[in-house]
Image (spheres, rainbow, N blue to C red):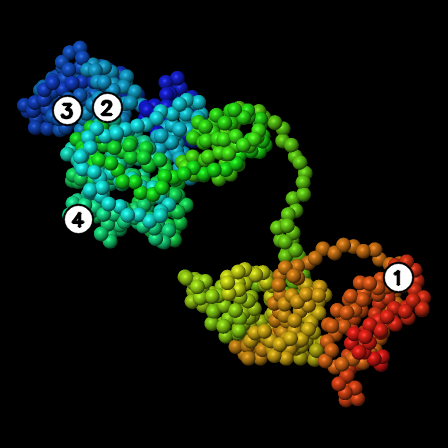
Amino acid sequence: MIVTRSWLEEYIDLSDISDEALYKRFNEIGLEVDSYKKYEIPAKVVVGEVISCQKHPDADKLNVCQVNIGNEVVQIVCGASNVVNARYVAVATVGSILPGDFKIKKAKLRGVESLGMICSSTELGLPELEDGIMILDDSIGELKVGEELNNYKRVADSVFELELTANRGDCQSIHGVARDLSAAFKKDLASFDFEPKRRTPIGVAKELSVVADDIPARLIYSICNIKELNINFLQRLRLAFVEIDVKDNIDMVLRYAMHESGVLNRAYDFDKLAVDGKVSLEIKKDNNIVEVVSNKRIVSIVGVNQNDEFRANKESKKVLLESSYIEPEFVIEGVSSNKLESDDLYYFSSRGSEPNVIYGVGVLQRTICVDGDVEFSSGDVKVGEKIQPRKMALNIKEVIDIIGFNIPKSEIANILLLLGYRMNKVDEDTFSIEIPPHAHDIKNTQDIAEEILRIYGIDNIEAKHSIIVEQNRITQTYKQYKDLRDLRERAIGVGFYEALTYAFANKELLEKYGFEVLDESLELINPIVKELNTLRSTILVNLLEAASRNVKYGKKSIKLFEAGVVFNSKREELQKIAFIYSGEEQRASVVNSAKAKMVDIDSFTKSLGGVIGDFELIECEAKNALMHPYISAKIIKDGNEVGYLAKLHPGVEKDFSLSDTFIAELDLEAVMPKHINAKELSNYQAVNKDLSVVVDKDLNFYNIAKAMQEFKENQALLKDFYPLDIYSDEALGDKKSLTIRFTIQSDTNTLSDKEIESVMSEILELLKSKFGAELR
């Protein structure tokens, strides 16, 4: 953002502020100065008045001019063609020294005496304005013939280039920067009011109709009849100072007004839009964009681009002017999601342009009227609701704690008021504040504190020693990360390799193997490849594909795991961990007589136990087509079902070119390592007792274990139990023999035989009453 001192002074009094102080204050309030230049016009360069201009007698491209320089009329030979149209010019008189150590002396050009030089802007060290000499007018102040040009402060101006961060859209204009300076210097910001002197008696509604949706934007339209659109010297000079290139006079007034106000301006050729002398616009919201449509043709997308076919140019005699604001987040999302091409106005709209569109219209109309022979329609057409300030509660103590310095409440309130905030006291330390619409980046108390601090001045904050306060930094997020890390390390410790696969899967494979798929309305719109066309509902299919690739690479033993996210049909995330063990458990060697031992359910469950700890298995029917119909089980941990384990179905093994393979998939959170509090160990001898009973053949040990666990909670002497042997034959019929080993121990004394037998009797009685067990 480039600003000039004289332009800023139209909004704030800087007469008592030096350039050095201004430079320093810019940096203090977060508007870092990238470059600074003070333009000085050389001495003895004065305002001259061209009295007459005639062709040089011996040179077609030279003119002989009589120029009043205040104290005399001098003759100057000039080679610029536009001198014939000039009245007031910049004259370097004899004795002046121009940039480049160019000294002006008396001279003869093709035999004609010349006493001075009529200058172009570049010859005086100013930016290039146009071909030929610099033609002055009263826009830089009242012209006095013979007055040194350096005394005109709008010409001998100071130019600051400010480096704005992306969140400072509020300072993308002269007005926005002046607003910040008014708070920094505690000076009033000048108000603005303008009404065109010439309006047609025809109401704007007779020439323009606008129909609009409910849109996140604000637009104002006005119609301008142009007889002649002139641009004064100051406007051209300032645009050159701020390095804005323009196409024609229409573009010049649009850019000038936008740089001053920060409001986005566009101009349309009225006659190209009109049907039977009237323009009809439809403004509608569609796919995160706001379109301006005329006769079913898109003439612009608000804040993004404009159709060149309808753009006003120097030939346009009747112009439809548009000043607009659109919410930055909305326009960014619209451009991104629709992959739109944007013009240079998108730079401003995406960072947050000035929301006060009414002010912007006034600046634009004044810019056009300064030297133009123009006439505006009666009234304007407003579209969209006025942008309302956001509200939030502000606790002053919290602000002071964030800053770390006790700034008086009155000072905080004054800074916020100067920045355009409104405040209402709720209690002693709390205020309800209204955040002005131009402050796009202010979201919370921390942002408010930053605003106060930059205006108050970081140099005014008293330096203090750092205070280090120790506190517990271990959060729940860290605990979850650590638990998952521990789980991974356990898996690696028992020989599993971690796999990392996409969260995407092949929908056809998921359906083939009986897994849940996304609802049709929630499917991926644009898959990265056709083989990964949906979100996975299981990790196992991805692991099987990885195992299949390993087989092709010549691997004989494949042991993989992956922890990650899967999705149900509603696209809700679930955290899972999956395991696969395929091929050889032991490779062929002397130990096994050159016969490789293949993985079996015993070796798989031992490996799985090394990762997740103790668990139990209950037979179950296959839940999907990956599971073997006869070798499948639920995994029970801490009394809860946490997943399943199975041998891979022979048909699936064939699909993936795998040999004997076992799989498991579990809820990740349910198997995360749990913190176990240490318990005091007994110093007394433990006793193991075996109990053999006859029970129904269909009785699952899980049911017995559940009942024994409840008994154990009430019987302090029973420390552990586990099945030792299961036996059945024809003699037992529909019964089976079950042997269970019990560990009995006291924490306070050595157990007597009577105490041991009492516990065993209670256990036998429980088994008889609950399960009809008989002592074998």
Residue 554 in view, yes or no:
no
Q: x, y (%) of residue 765?
A: 84, 73
Mark 1 residue type: Ser
Disc 1 marks which residue? 746
Q: CA distance from mark 1 to mark 2?
A: 104 Å
Sequence-wise first label, 1 or 2:
2
Q: Report if the CB atoms under discs 3 and 2 are less than 8 Å apart.
A: no
Q: Which residue is mark 2?
A: 139
Residue 699 lies, in percent from the top left, at: 74, 78
Query: Which residue occupies the foreground of this view, 19 or 720?
Result: 720
**3 or 2: mark nearer the eye:** 2
Q: Quick one: label 3 or label 2, which is nearer the N terminus?
A: 3
- The residue at the point 39 percent across, 47 percent down is 330
Gap in angstroms between the C-alphas marked 1 and 4: 101 Å
Q: Secondary structure at mark 4?
A: loop
x 20%, y 23%: residue: 137
Name of the residue lying farthest toward the bottom = 730
> What residue is disc 3 on?
86
Residue at the disc numbered 4: 275
First in sequence, mark 2 or 4: give its number. Answer: 2
Residue at coordinates 90% horizontally, 61% vertically from top-left? 684
The nearer-to-camera label among 2 and 4 is 4
Above or below for 177 versus 755: above
Is label 1 or label 4 in front?
Answer: 4
| Above or below 342: residue 540 | below
The answer for how far apart the CA atoms under marks 2 and 4 are is 39 Å
Mark closer to the chain start, 4 or 3: 3
Q: Would you call the spot at circle 1 few (<14 residues within 10 Å), some (14-19), or many (20 or more)?
A: some
Quarter holding residue 56? top left
Instruction: Decide if residue 429 is on the left or right side of residue 596.
Output: left
